[in-house]
Amino acid sequence: MKKITLTLTATLFAIASFAGDILTLNNEMVFEGKVTKIKDCAVVFKVDGNKYIVPASEIFSLQFENTEDKIYTRYMKMSDGDPNKCLNGRLDAENYHGKKGGHFVLGVLFGPFAMIGTALADPTPYKGKHTYMMSKNKDQFSDPEYLSCYRKKAKGQLIGMEALGWGAWILLVIVAGGL
């Protein structure tokens, strides 16, 4: 009986020592592995040597094995206040920033030069009058995480519109050349 108890205890101890962080997705799938990084509204999760980048919007819960881990402490500092700062920044940029039709025209007129200009720009919610007037997240306008996600989304959208304009100009030239 002692041998069975000792074997069972040793087995449970071995299994517990291999336990890791637990990631639960919104679709109720559960994964056990190691959180290696949390950045830009995404979690880098390692399972069996494979790395996966999981968007924060897809995560239902994260359970850390070691609460003394530096990634966990950084995650807790990040979630102080509003944990959706990055999402708020992206949504504000998508909904309120820039004149997308104007950037389409810039793409038609100036092509890659318009895209370079936009890539070098520094969009902020203070510069976008619609964002400043309509956003409900004014308290986050100076938060670095919010601003980083806002800039990425605003630049991406505007460069995309300029690329569409440039592409439309190229198609127009091709079609006009074929006539």
Image (cartoon, helix red, strand yellow):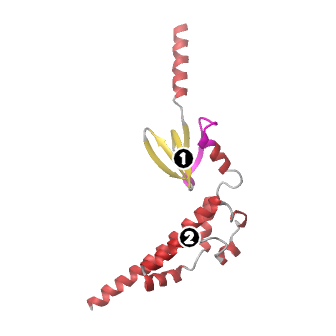
Image quadrant occupied by the C terminus: bottom left
**Residue 111 percent coordinates (x, y):** 42, 81
Residue extending furthest toward the bottom: 179
Residue 1 seen: no
Q: Give the range drawn in magenta.
A: 56-72
Say few, some or many: other residues with alpha carbon within 10 Å of mark 1 (under 14 / 14 to 19 / 20 or more): some
Residue 172 shown left or right of residue 13 in the figure: left
Magenta span contains residue 178: no
Identified at 52% across, 43% down, the residue is 36
Along the line of sight, which residue is nearer the eye, 33 or 154?
Answer: 154
Quadrant holding the N terminus: top right
Q: In this view, does 155 lie above or below 36?
A: below
100 lies above or below 57: below
Residue at screen point 48% across, 42% down: 46
Q: Residues within 10 Å of mark 2 (few under 14, many from 20)?
A: many
Secondary structure at numbered mark 1: strand
**Residue 15 point in image, percent of width and height:** 52, 26
Q: Which three-letter amino acid code belongs to the residue tagged 2?
A: Ala
Which numbered circle lies on residue 165? Answer: none
Instruction: Point out residue 6 in the picture as x, y percentages from the top left corner.
Output: 54, 12
Vertical relation: 50 (above or below) 116 = above
Q: Tell me the residue that label 1 is attached to.
A: 37
Magenta residue check for 63: yes
Task: Identify the residue at horizontal 44%, vertical 81% (top origin).
Answer: 165
Q: Mark 2 points at which residue?
A: 154
Q: Which amino acid does label 1 sit on?
A: Lys
